[in-house]
Amino acid sequence: MDLKTYKRSLLIVLFFIGASFQVQAQSTPVFDQLKARFDAGEVFKGQFEHVYLDSYTEETTRTDGNIWINAVGYKLESAQQTIVVDGEISQVYDGSRNRVIISEYEAEEDDFAPSRMLSGIDETYTASEEPLGDGKTKITLITTDDFAAFITVEIEVNAQLLPLKITAYDIADNVIITTFSEGAFIPENSSIFEFTHPEDAEIVDMRY
């Protein structure tokens, strides 16, 4: 899995979290309860499968891995890559090259930054909710902003407010589907976002 694919997966999930913070004007129970969980410092963890459907080539790309997200940072893991961002530093381990890239984290330049999602990117979206049965809810976010990353995002959550599926449609009619399993909210713990790599890995520090 390449870094671009990782970030696409991440963006969808961060969009979900950002929406839970920003669409407070809707005053919906789902958004309010989601906001409370992240405000309390909880971390969402789970396994994900990411499917990218390219409308032009009609190719389908599938990736999977593990994910942890809080309000300011995130961690993604697969068999070959690990990405950890703590809000200040970005660290990426590429197992195929046995290389670590470290760089200063600039949230304003990162389309996938939780802080950017939380600071107003979702203000152009309108939200609606639809019960799906068995305690599940589908949240639909729609925007008319021509510069938005996604035109429509559909988020399915269960009765415990855990994301089950996120389907996003971008301006080029590409479809990005992320499904989650083994999801849970857990208490914040500094060890969750620890970054480890082989001792013999090449270190490329972009901060200097």
Image (cartoon, rainbow, N blue to C red):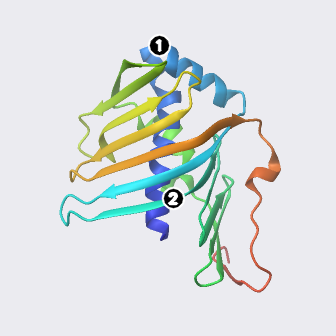
Residue 69 figure quarter:
top right
Residue 65, compared with residue 161, is above or below; it is: below
Quarter holding the C terminus?
bottom right
- Residue 35 point in image, percent of width and height: 59, 25
What residue lies at 56% left-to-right and 45% top-to-bottom? 114
Residue 197, compared with residue 129, is above or below; it is: below
| Observer-nearest of 162 and 72 | 162
**Which mark is first along the chain, 2 or 1?**
1
Report the side of 96 relative to 6 (left or right): right
For disc 2, the neighbor class at 10 Å (few under 14, some 14 to 19, many from 20) is many
- Residue 173 point in image, percent of width and height: 21, 50
Which amino acid is tagged 2? Asp
What residue is pinned by disc 2?
64
Q: Secondary structure at mark 2?
A: strand
- Residue 124 point in image, percent of width and height: 34, 31
- Residue 196 point in image, percent of width and height: 76, 68
What residue is pinned by disc 1?
27
Report the side of 96 relative to 50 (left or right): right
